[in-house]
Amino acid sequence: MIGSFGDAEVYSFHATKFVNTFEGGAIATNNAELANQIQLMRNFGFVGYDRVAHLGINGKMSEVSAAMGLTGLDSLDVFVAVNRRNYEQYRQELADVPGIELVTYDEGERHNYQYVVLEVDASQLGVSRDQLVHILQAENVMARRYFYPGCHQMEPYRLRSSQSATHLPHTEALTQRVVSLPTGTSIDTDTVVAICEIIRFVAAHCDEIEPALVPANEL
């Protein structure tokens, strides 16, 4: 079940998330000892009123953030409906674009449709994933090469194992292909159509566009 995988599961309530509290998050665990350590850590390590017994931070959620989270819970069905509408529109608009594959959701499961993710095949599209993102951003589209470059290639994890990069070849391949497109309640159907028109234009005119772009290895 969700919340019981591994020693602990961490949830983000950042403003970009499906359920958000402006900032913050939560940790779920079935380990009572670990739960106690986490509770100490989030409140300066205090045991009782003024005795510090553990390394800690001020990780408590404010009342305003909690209120935002509760308000969001009341609107979950609306958020899902808007996200799904955007996802379906992207899928329709990009269905026949060579080199662009929309990552689809399993319709047999429940989803919040929070992310619209593309995989880019540069050999078919005619431009690389990074070049496509560069074009979209130049057109004020907040596309991202999401989940890039992979946690194992960021600090401090990169320094912990000199062999870490060789252990995740599939992760590294995906981080070179994946693009996340804008969605959510601030995005309407017309915006989705306009974003997809840019992508279709790139696909149709890649021979003219590519020579004028910054080389992929310099982005």
Image (spheres, rainbow, N blue to C red):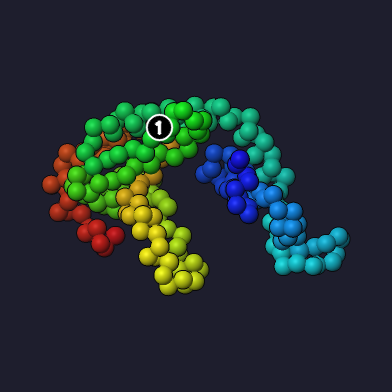
Quadrant assignment for the C terminus = bottom left
What SS does tag 1 mark?
helix
Front-most of residues 109 and 121: 109
Residue 141 pos. (x, y %): 35, 43
| In this rendering, position of residue 124 left or right of residue 26 | left
Amino acid type of disc 1?
A: Tyr
- Rendered residue at 13%/47% (across/down): 207
| In this rendering, position of residue 183 left or right of residue 76 | left
- Rendered residue at 80%/62% (across/down): 46
Residue 102 pos. (x, y %): 33, 37
Front-most of residues 64 and 90: 90
Give the quarter of the image for residue 20.
top right
| In this rendering, position of residue 154 left or right of residue 98 | right
Count of labels shown?
1
Q: Is residue 124 above or below residue 49?
A: above
Question: Which residue position holds label 1?
Answer: 87
